[in-house]
Image: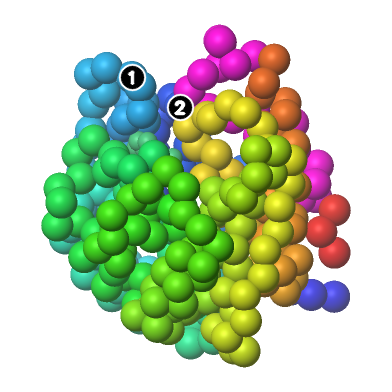
Amino acid sequence: MNSTKRILTIQDISCVGQCSLTVALPIISAAGIETAVLPTAVLSTHTGGFEGFTFCDLTEEMPKIENHWKKEHIFFDGAYTGYIGSIRQIDYILSIFSSVVKKDGIIVVDPCMADHGKLYPGFSSDFPKEMLRLCQRADILVPNMTEMCLLLEKEYKEQFTKEEIEQMVISLADKTDTSIVLTGVSFSANQLGCCIYHRENKTIQYYFTEKIPYSFHGTGDCFASSFFAGIMKNLSLEEAVRLACEFTYQALSATIEDRKEHWYGVHFEKALYLLNSIK
Ligand code: PXL
């Protein structure tokens, strides 16, 4: 029997809003993986559409938590990072990767900082170059289009050609020595998906599902969490992307009817059954 894997996910707790840890913890756990958390900050809600949210920065806790884990000889089979609370956390997270993630552990970084051409509220313009340092320590990156542009210091556009996307993905892979799953790729009105770059053989692939014509906060977190769960269950990069696309598609489909009331997040609970059945 395969032993249960234990992973670490590092991102904020948005108490209300269905994103980051409140999404990652149930999704990865549903795949049968023990999920430890390191919260980067506690917010009353996410920052996308609520007014006057609170923000408690947990930067100072990080080295204390790391030291305790080191003393207890706690190690993780993989790590996945999302929304980070301050620039100083980048160095703390790099140290945590070195001290408590096993040598052959897989590190997935979602350079969660922007969408629709704009940095999220609260991130300064020097954040992307710091995020690039974290990306350089990862095995796999899961950026959206805006984040990829920021990491490459390229101007964001609504629409890129296939050639432009492939050039950018290759240039980000060269800068970071990672495999890349670029989300939000679309070349037609009714399809949305990913461009996948494989570090091992330098090949590019695409995977698309039907496009749902609404956008919800936390969609990227649903995608990245289910993708990471697939990778930790030993799926190939392509299989994990397929799982994450199907999971996200089902979760979004379950949200459409309720989109007025539930504008702030995705009803991912309705799609968790897809994760229970990964072999
Ligand atoms: O879903 C990404 C995310 C995570 N955490 C916080 C956010 C957002 C996106 O807006 O505001 C606090």
Who's the residue at 28% across and 55% down the image? 155
**144, above or below 131, in the image:** above
Residue 66 x/y as whole percent: 31, 67
Give the alpha-carbon distance from disc 2 to disc 1, as whole Å.
9 Å
Q: Quadrant of ligand 1?
A: top left
Amino acid on which the number 1 mark rests in the picture: Phe
Q: Is residue 48 a member of the stretch shown in magenta?
A: no
Circle 2/circle 1 CB separation < 8 Å: yes
Q: Is mark 1 within 8 Å of ligand 1?
A: no
Q: Nearer the viewer, mark 2 or mark 1?
A: 1
What residue is shown at x 85% (from left), y 53% (from top)?
A: 277
Q: Secondary structure at mark 2?
A: loop
Question: Residue placed farthest to the top in the image?
Answer: 261
Residue at 48%, 87% (x, y): give it. Answer: 103
- For residue 17, the mark is 2
**Magenta extent:** 258-276
Question: Does residue 95 appear left or right of residue 60 in this picture?
Answer: right
Identify the disc placed on residue 50. Answer: 1
Identity, as a three-letter code, of the amino acid under mark 2: Gly
- Disc 2 residue lies near ligand 1 with CB under 8 A: yes
- Can you give x and y, in whole percent of width and height, for residue 81 in the image? 42, 59
Q: Is residue 159 left or right of residue 206?
A: left
Residue 269, quarter of the rendered image? top right
Nearest the viewer among 181 and 112 is: 181
Q: Earlier in the sequence, mark 2 or mark 1?
A: 2
The quarter holding residue 173 reads: bottom left
Q: How packed is label 1: few (under 14 Cα within 10 Å), some, or many (20 or more)?
A: few
